[in-house]
Image: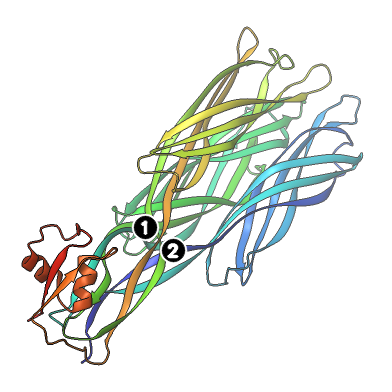
Amino acid sequence: MAIETAKDSLILNQIIEQKRDTFMVEEDCIVPDVKPDILNIISNSGIVCIYKKEIMDGKIRLDGCVNTYIMYLADTEENQVRSLNANIDFTQVIDMEKVRSDMSLDANVNLRGLEAHVLNGRKIHMKAILEVDAKVSSNETVEYVKEINNLNDVQCLNREFQINSLVGCGNTKVYAKDTINLDEADNLVEVMKTDLRITNRDTKISYNKVLIKSDLQVKIIYLTEDNRINMKEATIPVVGFIDLPNISEDHNCNVKYEIKNIIIKPNNVEDHSIYVEAEIEVYCEAYENRSIQMIQDLYSPTKNLQFNQKNVKVMQNQDLKKQVCNIREKQVIPEIGSRKIYDVEVLPVIEEQTILNDRIIYDGDLKLNFIFAGTGNTGIETKEASVPFSFTMDFDGVNSGSNIDTVIEIDAQNFIVMPDESIDIKVDLGFTAISGKDSSISIIDEVTEADSRATCQYSMIIYFVKPGDSLWSIAKKFGSTVEDISRVNGIENPDNLQVGKQLYIPRYHG
């Protein structure tokens, strides 16, 4: 007899391989003819743009650039502060032996260091250190048997699992564009430095779509014709849709942003303004938390059933938590004193992450690089400082066995020179933690009937419970049922069996 089964399916997102890698890219930059010679370098900064990510058998490839701004002291009588804007292009191949071309790649690339050295008055050598966190995953649709349709006496041992099933994934490309107006008195010579940050990230789910909203925070330091250095800030809204069939408000979304390209240049159409354009790719993975009953074992008292059982890796207890860490500090930096601060580069670094029951403790340092007005003929100077911090995030359900993926955003920053020449430091760090647990569960994907089951012509068997026995294993061994054995022996709790207990095993009558 053919066994008729009802099946259901899961879409499992399995992490195949993870790797953190550091690499270095170098480039020589020639000073354009219209700019003066370099005397020495004051500061450098960069923004990473990823043009393309590709996954191949046994390796991944990243194509991108570091968009750099180098501020330097010019070799002129006035000792002007000028700047260079140059791209360090790179192509990096990283070996990952388990990956295949049909898998999905999630790679975060961060700038960990940027150095610039003067080779001569017309040439500098730039070196960027980049860190890649790469995660390759595979989406697999798994079918499992949830019930037997045409066999009334089949006995099933079910177990309930809470798992995360992938609903779908998608991406979209959005453009943040705006014209930033300068003061009327500012005749722009050049952009000296830019900083871009994506903040206020929000996600809303509608019918078959995910609405993504955020802000692109832009900060620009520029030089005017009368040799003044000014700074301008702007906020550009970012809005887009990602099509995801079958998504609903009950699902969880994991959204990531990636800057692919930036254009910052004087506006040729409108005086006293700078045109800003950023190409941003947004990725989304949607999950549902499913409670499912899985058959872990089965048998029939009258048929000889065989089944195929296998283990699959699943993600359980996936959850997302956002919390803000408010850092408030006062520091006296004698080199700055009461001078004007043009900009502060802020880099949060997590030194240690401790996962306890229902909370995560982060210990780290806030690396600060102050760019401020110089003295005498030096228009700009820099000074590094740091602020240690410890932050505890309350997160129900996490423990030492949880996988935690943390992203830190700089939600707000403010640095004010006080009358006593101390610096009032206010930085809000937005922590986003995604927790989950890798587990393995057993599924049955096929049931067939083998040769006829050998039946024993007995009315009842007397059996003494052995170590490791369960009522299920005893019933299966003798072709009886848990219900019949419990009824005959007056067992109220089938899960509580005493070793050595005498049991009467009744014959199954259907």
x, y percentage for residue 427?
54, 27
Horizontal relation, residue 101 to residue 470: left or right: right
Image height of 167 relative to 75, above or below = below
Asked if labels 1 and 2 touch by Cβ distance under 8 angstroms, the answer is yes
- In the picture, measured across the screen, residue 17 lies left or right of residue 156, that is right
Which quadrant does the C terminus fall into? bottom left
Specify few, some or many for label 2: CA neighbours under 10 Å numbering under 14, 14-19, or 20 or more: many
Q: How many marks?
A: 2
Specify the label residue 287 is tagged with.
1
Residue 152 visible = yes
Residue 256 locus on image (x, y percent): 49, 51
Q: Position of residue 39 (x, y in %)?
A: 89, 32
Left or right: 509 with respect to 437?
A: left
Q: Amino acid at mark 2?
A: Asn
Q: Quadrant of residue 418?
A: top right
Q: Nearer the viewer, residue 372 or 37?
A: 372
Residue that carries the numbered disc 2 in the rendered image: 13
